[in-house]
Image (cartoon, grey):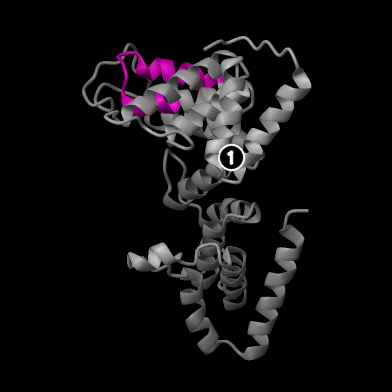
Amino acid sequence: MTTSPTLADAPKHEQAYQQGTQAYDSQDYETAFKLLLPLAEQGDARAQYQIGVMYRFSEGVKLKEGEAAIVHQEKAKEWFTAAAKQGNPDAQVKLADHILLFFENPKKATEALAWLEKAVAQDHAFAKCELADIYFEGITDDIASGTPVDKEIKPDPDKAIELLNSAAEQNSICALNKLSRIHQKGKYGIPVNLTEAHKWLVKTAELGNTDSMTMVGDNYANGHGVEQSDLHAYMWYHTASEITGDSNKPTPEMIAYGIVYVDHNAERLKPLDERMPSDKITEAKNLSRLWIDEHKPK
């Protein structure tokens, strides 16, 4: 595995990379793996990161007979490390996750922290969100399942909130959701503020997160942080249901195993359908359609 790219034919290399990522996005993982592995071996950090992801989830590559799943995790770490050393922020975040997840060595706390800080230095929004989690809780020997860390990381909620606010400005759904929950529950020295929690939740919904749309609807239905409004509750539930569409309907395999998808937004709409005048329901649906038209990807 090399760590410095030697791209003799850059146009062909870039074409192969684009074809590989397109195959991956189309869930043709075997083709993606075949296209991207040679590029990763040549030192392309983007390809190294993607191959690491594919090993992490065993996409496009199968375990050999007798191999344990940990083999793929170790391969994933190798590729994440190669890409991270070249400065790939996505790989730096994944490597930090791997270190913390697998409790690898006594230095895991500061090692993971160092990789996240490198990604944050590149303005990586999700790295900020993950680093905030570390500063909210800190890392001690107890959290590390009894394994000693080289240096305990003490909680620093002020720094954590600063990181989340910065990530939220980049429209990080992770950060927006965390800020909403913090204001809803009143944590880390921040008092309960349902109005502020609702504000952050709306921002997340506006990025297309349907779970957040449902929760915004709940806020309107119950008057949490906003004036109670059946009209707006209906609008948000209907919007979430429309955007979700058929994507969560059960496949034949799910049905065979008795797995049934429940449209929670449809369940929430039932009592509103029963008590709201028909003209208000029509108005709510019109508001939903206008919102979807305004926020759909251009």
Residue at 60 percent across and 68 percent down: it is 236
Horizontal side of 258 relative to 133 (left or right) equals left
Q: Where does residue 209 sit, x and y in percent of width and height?
A: 58, 54
Residue at 41 percent across and 16 percent down: it is 110
Q: Is residue 197 above or below residue 57?
A: below
Please identify the quarter of the rendering in which residue 239 is found: bottom right
Q: Is residue 42 above or below residue 280?
A: above
Please identify the quarter of the rendering in which residue 290 is found: bottom right
Q: Where does residue 242 sit, x and y in percent of width and height?
A: 61, 69
Asked if residue 185 shows in the view, the reply is: yes
Instruction: Tell me if residue 109 is in the magenta stretch.
Output: yes
Instruction: Tell me if residue 230 is in the magenta stretch.
Output: no
- Residues shaded magenta: 96-118
Residue at 53 percent across and 64 percent down: it is 214
Q: Residue 22 versus residue 97: which sits nearer the camera? A: 22
Asked if residue 157 shows in the view, the reply is: no
Q: Crowding at label 1, few (<14), some or many (≥20) Cα neighbours within 10 Å?
A: many
Name the secondary structure under disc 1. helix
Q: Where does residue 293 sit, x and y in percent of width and height?
A: 75, 64
Q: Residue 217 versus residue 35: which sits nearer the camera? A: 35
Residue at the outermost left position: 146
Q: Main secondary structure of the magenta part?
A: helix
Q: Is residue 243 above or below residue 20?
A: below
Horizontal side of 145 relative to 287 (left or right) equals left
Query: In the image, what residue type sits under mark 1?
Result: Tyr
Give the residue number, with chain letter if any, for mark 1.
24
Q: Residue 34 versus residue 198: which sits nearer the camera? A: 34
